[in-house]
Image (cartoon, grey):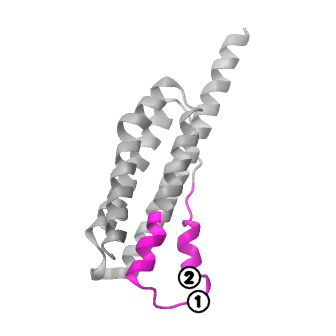
Amino acid sequence: MSEPSLLIFDTARIVGVLDGLLRSELTATNTYQLALDRLGSDAPVAICDGLESHRRRCTLIAEHIQGLGGPSTAQGGLWNGFTRLFANGRMRIDRHAICAALQEGEYRTLIHYHEAAIRLDEDSLAVLEEHLLPELYRIHHALSTLAIKGS
């Protein structure tokens, strides 16, 4: 009798971990959208690509949560590094500062993914390793390259 409740507990725990990843992706999506709004036509292609990548990851994680039978309660905000840019009430923020804040957010998201990996079941870990992490590494690399070039 205790085995079914153990299964429910494990599924609930896994859904909670995935919900945390979804929250990170929603936050990234909000942050990238704000960056694009601020930069307008001056936005590098890597930022547009980053937004689309995070949107795809949101969809993938939400579908996986739903496949596990769990509801998602995730809501996103903005990355801390990005909110610090606006904390002083600066109206004009240069492209380099925005790119650096996005790169910091990608790095922190990468750490979050690695911390979450040890708490996932085999199927969820496969989704993370085969679909989510490669995209995250690709976008992180693109932003790093942008930062090296001086955005």
Are the two marked residues, 1 and 2, in contact with CB atoms closer than 8 angstroms? yes
Residue 79 vs 141, above or below: the answer is below
Q: What range is drawn magenta here?
A: 75-103
Residue 81 vs 107, above or below: the answer is below
Under circle 2, the secondary element is helix
What amino acid type should be assigned to the residue bearing mark 2?
Phe
Residue 121 vs 95, above or below: the answer is above
Q: Is residue 71 visible?
A: no
Residue found 59% across the figure and 68% down from its top? 80
From the top left corner, tell me how far across and down residue 102 is, in percent: 45, 67
Considering depth in this image, is 30 or 90 the residue closer to the camera? 90
Q: In the image, 58: left or right of 11?
A: left
What amino acid type should be assigned to the residue bearing mark 1?
Gly
Location of residue 143 by image quarter:
bottom left
Q: Is residue 20 magenta?
A: no
Residue 67 vs 78, above or below: the answer is above
- Outermost residue on the front side: it is 148
Considering depth in this image, is 84 or 23 the residue closer to the camera? 84
At label 2, counting other C-alpha atoms closer than 10 Å, the crowd grade (few under 14, some 14-19, many 20 or more) is few
Location of residue 150 by image quarter:
bottom left
| Residue at numbered disc 2 | 86
At label 1, counting other C-alpha atoms closer than 10 Å, the crowd grade (few under 14, some 14-19, many 20 or more) is few
Under circle 1, the secondary element is loop
From the top left corner, tell me how far across and down residue 145 is, in percent: 32, 64
| Residue at numbered disc 1 | 89
From the top left corner, tell me how far across and down residue 97 is, in percent: 45, 78
Location of residue 12 by image quarter:
top right
